[in-house]
Image (tube, grey):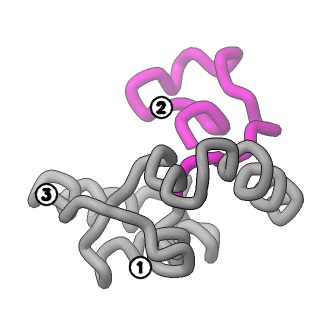
């Protein structure tokens, strides 16, 4: 989201945003749907989720849904977690599907 709308600390640098960027990270629902290996959220992670929940840049339904899911499952994962499905799964299957869904 920082790439799309800019960071709060760099609000004065409007020309550095990329509004057409698409999120390609792991969603909370991906952890559940794909049964991904994960790590527990830290207290810092939970604090940040509460901050994001109040941030106007994250008011869209999809962001709020994902924040709530992260808070419910209390887990996080990196894209490397998809390697459980094979080394090329993320490039061959996951990312094309996610990019198509985000259109």
Kindly indicate whether the residue at mark 1 contacts the one at mark 2 (C-beta within 8 angstroms): no
Instruction: Tell me the crowding category of disc 1: few under 14, some 14 to 19, or many 20 or more residues within 10 angstroms, Cα based.
Output: some
Which residue is the site of mark 1?
69
**Prevailing secondary structure of the magenta residues:** loop
Which residue is the site of mark 2?
7
* Region in magenta: 1-26
Kindly indicate whether the residue at mark 1 contacts the one at mark 3 (C-beta within 8 angstroms): no
Cα–Cα gap, marks 2 and 1: 23 Å
Quadrant showing the C terminus: bottom right
Quadrant showing the N terminus: top right
Magenta span contains residue 11: yes
Residue 50 drawn above or below residue 79: below
Disc nearer the start of the sequence (2/1) = 2
Would you say 24 lies left or right of 52 here? Answer: right
Q: Residue furthest left?
A: 43
Instruction: Tell me the crowding category of disc 3: few under 14, some 14 to 19, or many 20 or more residues within 10 angstroms, Cα based.
Output: few
Give the number of the mark in front: 2 or 1: 1
């Amino acid at each position: 989201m920082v790439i799309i709308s800019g960071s709060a600390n760099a609000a004065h640098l409007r020309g550095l945003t990329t509004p057409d960027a698409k999120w390609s990270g792991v969603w909370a629902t991906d952890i559940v749907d794909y049964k991904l290996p994960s790590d527990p959220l830290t207290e810092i992670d939970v604090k940040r989720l509460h901050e994001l929940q109040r941030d106007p840049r994250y008011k869209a339904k999809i962001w709020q849904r994902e924040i709530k899911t992260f808070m419910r499952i209390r887990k996080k994962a990196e894209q490397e977690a998809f390697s459980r499905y094979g080394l090329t799964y993320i490039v061959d299957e996951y990312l094309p599907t996610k990019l198509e869904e985000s259109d």
